[in-house]
Amino acid sequence: MSGAAAPAQQMTGSNRYMLLILLVPGLLALMTTFLLPMVWLARASFSTSSMSAFGGGVTLEHYHAALTDPFYWKVAMNTLSLGVTVSFFAVILSYPIALFLTRSTSRWRGVLTALAVAPLLTSAVVRTYGWMVILGDRGVINSTLQSLSLTTDPVRLSNNTFGATVALVEILMPYAILAMLAGFGRLNPQLEEAASMLGASKLRVFWRIILPLSLPGILTGALLVFVLAISAFVTPRLMGGGRVFVLGTEVFQEATVTLNWPLAAALSVVLLALFSSVIVIYQRALRRLEA
Amino acid sequence: MSEHHVVVENLVKTYPGAATPSVDHVSFALPKGEMLALLGPSGCGKTTILRMIAGLIEPTSGAIQLNGREISQTPVHKRNMGMVFQAYALFPHMTVAGNVAFGLEMRGVPNSERGPKVQRALDMVKLGHLGDRRVTQLSGGQQQRCAIARSLVIEPELLLLDEPLSNLDAKLRDEMRDEIREIQSRTGVTAIFVTHDQDEALSMADRLAVMSAGRIEQIGTPREIFDAPANEFVAGFIGAGNFLSGRVTAPGQAEIEGLGPLRFAAPASVGSRVQLMVRPHRFKLAAPGPNAFTGQVESLVYRGQILTLAITVGGRRLTADLHTHAGTLPAKGDTVTLAVAPGDVTFLSEAAA
């Protein structure tokens, strides 16, 4: 901490102005696109008028509604469990890929890395539709099963939490891979060599050296996927077929269907508060791990 | 079965796609407790040899024996060798003691015996009080010591050191050089180390193998290598030298182009061409006479105990290292005479004319 503060103290007055000038465009952009809407959202959540944020009086009734209705508690639990499941599987599936890409010395490594994150080039909506084609009642899997006479009725693979989970895992895997690649900085083939020289078998090298050193990357990847999964709206909505209730879909429902903006805003604030605290706790744990 | 502790025979490593082998039929043998330096310019294959002995690289062909047992098929983690890596390769997520204990843990040494062993190893490298530190909090020299303790605590059959001093600053390097030597002779462990630094090799090793282009050019004690280099490459790589070629005109005398006659103490047949060398420190200031060359001082470098000067004689440069206690020192532009005793002329090679 003190090491990072030292250069700032040596900064001369003109340097500090220069820094401020460089920061202004970015700060302005953040103010208008992030901070102002947040203020608007917070104000709207206390509003007595259903369609305008700043009109009407101030009330706590929407928070009361959001926090006392057992339905919203169930939605919050659904969201949390979807986030945990998706990040668990996305991490399990991405870890070997990221590890391979980090350790590979092949000249194709750059190409392979690009391929691993190439799905990011298509939008999540398009990929969700892709999963609907695969997992739908008349989709690739079900029509294959039926043409082989293995099943008579379609197996329920979509329009439920399973479908939403599968699609989210695949859609979020590139993020997990990228986060892990960035977090694997401490991995070093020489450490593995040193461990085997000291008598560690391949398996023990993995458990005692590779896994502990890649843990920060794994945890960063898991956090990123978790955040993206709990705030996801399009995929749970489309793959859930209206049967999967998570906070993202409920906020959308209140804002566009029921047209209850203050309640939608209150739900958003609750979502924000809930999951920011998760992130803060998580990052604190992560920092302790890296120290 | 040989009496040697480590035997390397006809070791070859050719990397896929490479036209020439990186290590080309290298053989040497090492008695127990000896320290061997593999010395050579970068890319000469010295590190490849070390890594093949360690088991980190598979040899293309050849044999490696330890204690009379063939080990080239033994996996790395069963070879029981200690290795000190150039960048130390300490485990950043463990404490100093944790690093040292790792090898014992892998060997299934019970917890109760591990503690005292780790402490003894840390005491040996003067890190006894730092066992609880994280390795990232250690200075360069301390990390080096930790790496040495970690490689020795397992009581290895053989200690391998890969450029162990190259990451340290000059002062620390001298200190660690003596310390490694001291620890090695105290523990009596057989050791092989790789270096490109001739001073390091000369001062630390019992014997050194000078390498170039995948081959061993000469193997011998520091004194043999320095005073009787086998060829021009070895002579040039270890220490500086004035290389003089000429024709033998009489037994023990050659006519050097541009310089005149030079007497030397080695048998060579009259009429053949010889390659001779004079180390700069073999020259002395003298009056003109036989085996003496007179010229103008072209450059001077004062280095405390030694004055390095270069004179030009007949269009040829001769360098000499003179002791600074030798009375009045010449200045630039002075005319001086450098003489060498015939016994101090190194004979390198002879070829029929």
Image (spheres, coloured by chain):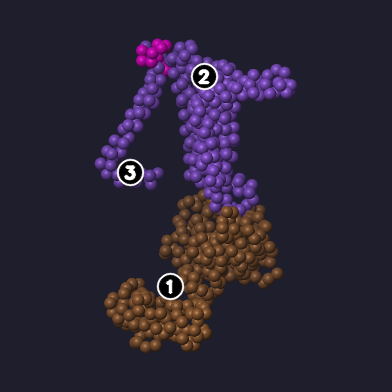
Task: Answer whether labels 3 and 2 touch (C-beta < 8 Å).
Answer: no
**Helix, strand or loop under label 1:** loop
Chain depicted in brown: B
Residue that label 2 marks: A249
Q: Disc 2 vs disc 1: which is toward the camera?
A: 1
Q: Which residue lies at the image location 45% right of the left edge and 60% below the top edge?
A: B168
Q: Which mark is residue B240?
A: 1
Determine the chain carrying the residue at label 2: A
Note whether residue A83 is visible: no
Please, which residue is most extreme toward the left here?
A14
Dot 1 amino acid type: Ala
Residue segment shown in magenta: A45-55
| In the rendered image, the vertical position of residue B174 relative to residue A87, given as above or below | below
Q: Position of residue B32 (x, y in %)?
A: 62, 70
**Residue that carries the numbered disc 3 in the rendered image:** A8
Return the chain for callout 3. Answer: A
**Residue B298 coordinates in the image, percent (x, y):** 31, 74
Looking at the image, residue A100 sits to the left or right of residue B233; the answer is: right
Q: Please tell me whether the stretch drawn in magenta is mainly helix, strand or loop.
A: loop
Where A287 falls versus A121 (above or below)? below
Choose the circle earlier in sequence order: 3 or 2: 3
Pointer 2: residues within 10 angstroms few (<14), some, or many (20+)? many
Whether residue A41 can be seen here: yes
